[in-house]
Image (cartoon, rainbow, N blue to C red):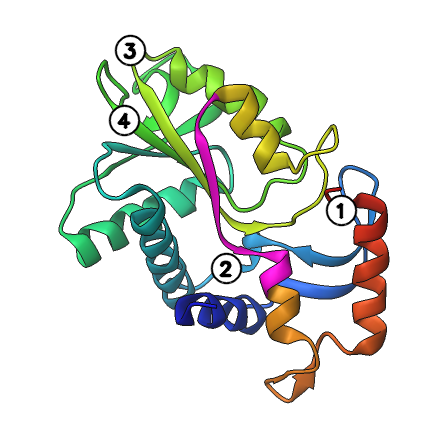
Amino acid sequence: MEQYKQEFIEFMIDCDVLKFGEFTLKSGRKSPFFMNAGAYVTGTQLMKLGEYYAKAIYKDYGADFDVLFGPAYKGIPLSVATTIAFAKLYGKEIRYCSNRKEVKDHGDTGILLGSKIKDGDRVVIIEDVTTSGKSMEETVPIVRAQGDVEIIGLEVSLNRCERGKGDKSALEEIKDLYGFKTNAIVTMEEVVEYLYNREVNGRVLIDDNMKKSIDAYYEQYGVR
């Protein structure tokens, strides 16, 4: 496993973003782990998060794109932090763009925040985590409605590696449905591999009992 992935896993734990226990997801599934990107709250945390995303996006898609689109609401700080990091690390000015939940009819009108998207733009979408792919049902039409644009890919921080609406993972379903690549900084499989019986900050987060709970979860919801 690459060094930056190991560092990112520990970073999620340090920021109290990745937790283990018993959680009920929006889908109704009972999960032994949970990721909450809303727990990144300080300047230093957001700066580091943007750098991890920028490195992953550069590895997965290169620098030949124009706009980083972060769906409201959590995607807004993600897109801002990552465009800053991209300029710092790779000297490339990527424009950030996000959507509003409600169309604004005065001043800076429309549904978009940040840069407008125009004909010929190549777009990468950035999100925290995708379980069902439902957010893409809203996001992709918004981006494609802006003109003759190309969505080249989606980058999330964690691939939960579980089924979406069918037998494939949510990221695979998005790839098949919309025709663009999907990638993650780390997968849950990598998280489990790295943390199993490993002490981080004085704690073993995935011991034998937690490993059994995770295995049972994937037996029920994992990709076949």
Pointer 1 residue: 222
Tell me how far mark 2 sits from mark 4, CA to CA: 28 Å
Tell me how far mark 4 sits from mark 1, CA to CA: 32 Å
Of callouts 2 and 1, which one flags the residue occurring earlier in the amino acid sequence?
A: 2
Q: Residue at x 74, y 66 (%)?
A: 20
Q: Position of residue 195 (x, y in %)?
A: 64, 74
Tag nearer the camera, 3 or 2 = 3
Q: Quick one: label 2, few (<14), some, or many (20+) residues within 10 Å?
A: some
> Most extreme residue toward the left, as rendered?
91
Pointer 2 residue: 40
Label 4: which secondary element: strand
Residue type (three-letter) at the residue carrying disc 4: Arg
Instruction: State the residue in front, 81 or 207.
Output: 207
Region rendered in magenta: 179-190
Label 1: which secondary element: loop
Of callouts 1 and 3, which one flags the residue occurring earlier in the amino acid sequence?
A: 3
Q: Quadrant of the C terminus?
A: top right
Pointer 3 residue: 148
Do tag 4 and tag 3 residues touch (Cβ < 8 Å)? no
Tell me how far mark 1 sits from mark 3, CA to CA: 37 Å
Residue type (three-letter) at the residue carrying disc 1: Gly
Q: Residue at x 57, y 45 (%)?
A: 129
Tag nearer the camera, 2 or 4 = 4
Pointer 4 residue: 122
Instruction: State the residue in front, 70 or 216.
Output: 216
Can you say whether 186 is above or below 195 in the image? above
Q: Position of residue 185 (x, y in %)?
A: 47, 54
Residue type (three-letter) at the residue carrying disc 3: Asp
Label 3: which secondary element: loop
